[in-house]
Image: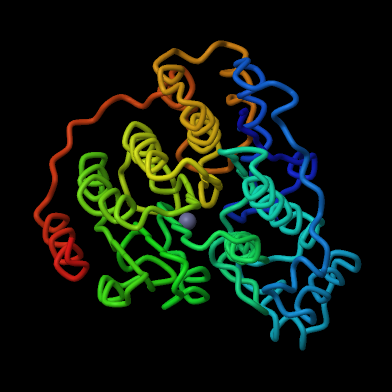
Amino acid sequence: MQNYIFTSDIFKGSRYEKGHPLDMDRVWPSVELLKLMGWVNDNQIIKNEVASIEELIKYHDKGYVEALQQAEINQYLPDIYKKKYNIGVGNNPIFKEVFSRPASAAKASIKAIEMLANNDAKRILNFSGGTHHGRKSEAYGFCFLNDCVLAILRALELGFSNILYVDIDAHHCDGVQDVFVEHENVTVVSVHEKDRWPKTGLVEDCKIHNIMNFPVPEGFNDDEMNIIIKNAVLPLGNSIKPDLLIIQAGSDMLDGDPQSRLSLTNNGYWKAISDLLTICNTSLTLGGGGYNPYLTAKAWAGNWALVNNHIEWLDDDIPLSCQELLKNLKWNNSRVRNGIPDHWLKSWRDPVSKSIVRDEVLFLLDKVLKIKKI
Ligand SMILES: [Zn+2]
């Protein structure tokens, strides 16, 4: 049975407003890399449609979804609605595709779940998904809808009864935890930077039966990620034996991402994801955060190698055609003022960095294992 990947033309040329962290391209370059590498067949790429209102209001408020549509049509919302729904406010700007882009991402996650439930596929990727901050009737943290919540709700509707959601984005998955906290059929695990916005995801939440949180310190590295996955997340996953695994694979934990102070290389990132994939044969792997376009395109394209059990693909250098694609991605950030570092362009893997597991991480792991009695 072959694996699938969702994408949409809407992501080509769609950007948040100038100066926003999402004023750059991530989804289409990741897919384009796969095509240039010859890692994917055309019939494995599914074009996202736009979710219907009926599909979206399984979670979101109808008034909110309609306001989002109006914001797209008119490129404007009256102040009263802006305030009520947090649309066009702060980091959640009204942009050209402010409804149809998140609604495409949401449809892809919903459709992926339907394919998995129907046994049409075992592993699916949706780079445009992972919008884990979206609220029922509020835009939050660059997220206008919450495809993760919509996917889990659809999965429950279709008979999955033991869903494991694991989120390795640098930011806590507040929008997902809040919906499924204490749910009998959903377990929510998150590894995220401590004290970073939205500042939720405390370790004390582990006292709740279906929540496991690892708020990790600045400088969090590959070996530290590995001991958390190996000693806590894998044992938890293997004991609950989920019938569906959803991985939010935000790449903003990577060293070089401007939205976190974590120091993972893609070696640690991919090791974590390939280990997580062993927990369950049926999985949906999403995108999420990722604000360095070169690192994110490589990380997400690499996830396709992992879901296809071809981790060895990532040991190669990057061919010139792919380097050109990466080089041409525009990024207005001081990190590339003097050019794009070679190791972001020339090889799939980052250089292996020597790292030690710090006491703070060992204490955090110990605390979680004690609370969870693992
Ligand atoms: Zn993030």
Work out whether residue 211 or residue 240 is closer to the camera in this orientation and state it.
240
Residue at the image position 62 percent from the left and 44 percent from the top: 126
**The C terminus, quarter of image:** bottom left
Nearest the viewer among 163 and 259 is 163
Rendered view: 316 above or below 241:
above
Q: Measuring from the top left, give residue 346's x and y in whole percent.
A: 46, 17
Q: Position of residue 231 (x, y in %)?
A: 20, 49
Residue farthest right in this picture:
74
Residue 181 picture quarter: bottom left
Q: Is residue 344 left or right of residue 87?
A: left
152 or 1, which lies in front? Answer: 1
- The part of the image, by quadrant, that contains residue 125 is top right
Residue sitting at the far left = 359
The percent coordinates of residue 370 (x first, y second) are 14, 67
Residue 259 x/y as whole percent? 45, 54
Q: Quadrant of the N terminus?
A: top right
Please state which of residues 176 and 326 is positioned toward the viewer in this rendering.
Answer: 176
Position of 96 with respect to 286 (left or right) is right
The number of callouts visible is 0
